Amino acid sequence: MQVDQERALEIITSPAVAWFIFGLFLAFFGVISIILVYHWRKYGLNNKQIAFAELVYFPVSFVLIGLSAFALIMYLTL
């Protein structure tokens, strides 16, 4: 069986594949975030350091995800 390398490259570099990978990343991030919040709430016992971690984790994460989405949009529109 011979693989058409040009067609394979076209599929790999398609925007749908890039958005699919980004979606998988977001799903993974969501699962990890749920686990972290559960453990912070269950075992943190209202610790100030845990509250600070929550306060920093989500805004920084959303900024980084937003920048990643922006970079993906810019990359795919070139």
Image (cartoon, helix red, strand yellow):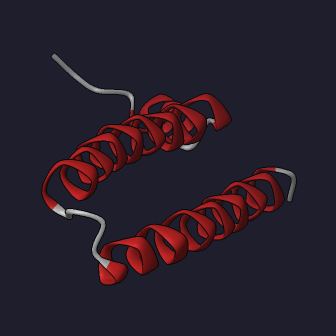
Near-viewer residue (36 or 66): 36
Q: Is residue 64 left or right of residue 8?
A: right
Quarter of the rendering occupied by the C terminus: bottom right
Quick one: which residue is furthest to the front in this view?
46
Q: Is residue 38 left or right of residue 27?
A: left
Give above or below for 72 relative to 26: below
Q: Residue at x 52, y 33 (%)?
A: 17
Give above or below for 73 relative to 14: below
Near-viewer residue (53 or 41): 41
Q: Is residue 29 left or right of residue 10?
A: left
Quarter of the rendering occupied by the N terminus: top left
Near-viewer residue (42 or 70): 42
Give above or below for 38 relative to 51: above
> In x, y percent, where is residue 45?
20, 62
> In x, y percent, where is residue 63?
68, 68
Q: Is residue 73 left or right of residue 33?
A: right
Q: Residue at x 18, y 52 (%)?
A: 39
Residue 70 figure quarter: bottom right
Q: Residue at x 44, y 67 (%)?
A: 54
> In x, y percent, where is residue 37?
32, 50
